[in-house]
Image (cartoon, rainbow, N blue to C red):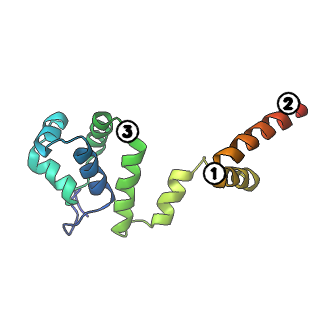
Amino acid sequence: MTNGYKKDKKANHLSTAIRTLRYNRNMRQSAIAKALGISVAAYSHYECGIRIPDIKTLLKLSYLHNININHLVFLACMDIADDKVISSEDIYDIFAAGFTLPEDELELLMNYRRSSERFRNDILLFSQAAYECSI
């Protein structure tokens, strides 16, 4: 990839996401392009995976679609990783930096997520009771 252009035309993580966001809002490419202040051709290149939007365009897209910009930046980074610039494992590490949980907390969270709604409520009640007993 050079100057934001991908070597071959293919759908990628980000292009699929922005196309889906547009479809879900029943909008035309021309309407999105106008809202972003770019040409329809430029926007089409983003949806086709020919180009990766710059950070200003990602900001505008996140605002337009009311989504967290981190999601779009992550997808753009995964597309860059797919071009073998950096490994996808390194991308995950970069996005997880400072946000990793200790093993015991991660195990508690995973057990909670795997539980049914009924057991989730029991887990919350138990943890609140355990906390109150500890203070």
Quickly name the residue at label 3. Answer: 67
First reached walking from the N terminus: tag 2 or tag 3: 3
Q: Is residue 112 left or right of residue 51?
A: right
Q: Is residue 85 left or right of residue 134?
A: left
Give the CA distance from mark 2 to mark 3.
Answer: 37 Å
Is residue 57 placed above or below 83 in the rendered structure?
above
Looking at the picture, tell me which residue is in the foreground, 77 or 113: 113
Quickly name the residue at label 2. Answer: 132
Is residue 112 placed above or below 8 in the rendered structure?
above
Residue 89 coordinates in the image, percent (x, y)? 50, 65
Quickly name the residue at label 1. Answer: 113
Residue 40 coordinates in the image, percent (x, y)? 10, 46
Residue 3 coordinates in the image, percent (x, y)? 22, 56
- Residue drawn at point x = 16 percent, y = 55 percent: 45
Whether pointer 2 and pointer 3 mark residues with C-beta atoms closer than 8 Å, the reply is no
Crowd band around label 2 with a 10 angstrom C-alpha radius: few (<14), some (14–19), many (20+): few
- Which amino acid is tagged 1? Arg
- Residue drawn at point x = 15 percent, y = 36 percent: 37
First reached walking from the N terminus: tag 1 or tag 3: 3
Residue most extreme to the front: 118
